[in-house]
Image (spheres, coloured by chain):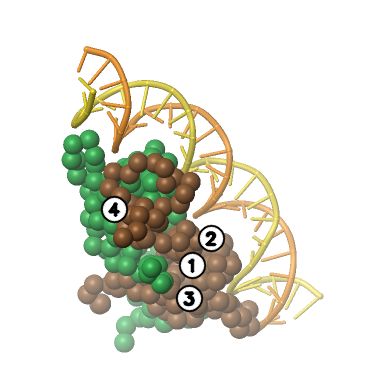
Chain colours: A green, B brown, C orange, D yellow
Amino acid sequence: MMDPMHLVPEERAHRRPIDEHTVCAAVAGIGEPQAVRVWADRFSLLGEPGRLAVLLAVHRAGPIAVTDLALATGISETAVSQILRLLRVAGAVTAAKEGRVVRYRLDDPDLARLLDSVPPLPGGH
Amino acid sequence: MMDPMHLVPEERAHRRPIDEHTVCAAVAGIGEPQAVRVWADRFSLLGEPGRLAVLLAVHRAGPIAVTDLALATGISETAVSQILRLLRVAGAVTAAKEGRVVRYRLDDPDLARLLDSVPPLPGGH
DNA sequence: CACAAGCCTGCACAGGTGTGCAGGTGTTTC
DNA sequence: GAAACACCTGCACACCTGTGCAGGCTTGTG
């Protein structure tokens, strides 16, 4: 069998672990730092009430205009615009201009699955 | 049929929507602000690379000590301690003291499901 | 053309957040 | 008992981030 610590980067391989096997399993479980950063950024988008509300509305209410998003979420139109700009450059949503109205839709399968993790209204209505 | 805007809070029911049906669907899709905040807090815990790495390690490498977490993640032991304190008060992890070693484990089903959304190492090894 | 609606942006401010340092507690070992 | 180990905490700092204000742009309307 190989060295149980073979997954630990050399720069810190000299430090003494408490449980070598667990450390190796942890390194494997974490995966590549690059991927961790990408997923942390994804989760970060959902980590603020305003953005989460906007994303839920965009995801579940189909293409929707900025004014309607502000009306439904209770956030000022300015703040909604800022949020949408952030989501746009992050590749989370795409804008479709129709006349003077811009409708946004969700455009990220990973985010869609994460949003589906959030339970909808319990009783319906 | 009822008023299509019946789901919009009175305080902003006077504002003119672009698509009443869409606004109502958005309000329903967002759900209760209280629940949105709770889920935003959940996602926020996963929204930082350090915390996400620690949570992934704790989740996939079973009960693990602080030293081993610092070794596996490459984060300083102080930073790991701070992260674990935050996760503790958030109810995400629980600590089990064994001698002078403290092993942490994940203790939140919702977070566990979200962590399972993060794909493991592609090829294995 | 003048005006309003819908939306976007730059700027400055307050508030939250991660990090390192220094020091402390409890436990094990010699 | 002294020293090393594993871990925790308070504090101060730099940093990032969300928000509102003011203004600008484009598109419809009279």
Q: Nearer the viewer, residue A60 or B90?
A: A60
Please tell me in which quadrant of the rendered image residue A122 appears.
Answer: bottom left
Tag 3: Cα neighbours inside 10 Å, few (<14), some, or many (≥20)? some
| Marked residue chain, label 1 | B
Q: Secondary structure at mark 1?
A: helix
Q: Which residue is mark 2?
A: B79
Q: Amino acid at mark 1?
A: Ala
Q: Quadrant of the C terminus of chain A?
A: bottom left
Q: Which residue is mark 3?
A: B108
Instruction: State the CA–CA distance, disc 4 to disc 1.
Output: 48 Å
Q: Amino acid at mark 3?
A: Asp
Work out whether mark 4 precedes mark 2 in sequence or the reverse, and give the earlier one.
Answer: 4
Check if mark 2's residue and mark 1's residue have beta carbons within 8 Å: yes
Work out whether mark 2 precedes mark 1 in sequence or the reverse, and give the earlier one.
Answer: 1
| Marked residue chain, label 3 | B
Q: Are the residues under marks 4 and 1 on the same chain?
A: yes
Instruction: State the CA–CA distance, disc 3 to disc 2.
Output: 22 Å
Tag 2: Cα neighbours inside 10 Å, few (<14), some, or many (≥20)? few
Q: Which residue is mark 1?
A: B70
Q: Secondary structure at mark 2?
A: helix
Work out whether mark 3 precedes mark 2 in sequence or the reverse, and give the earlier one.
Answer: 2
Q: Which residue is mark 4?
A: B22
Residue in view at x 44 percent, y 45 percent: B12
Q: Secondary structure at mark 3?
A: loop
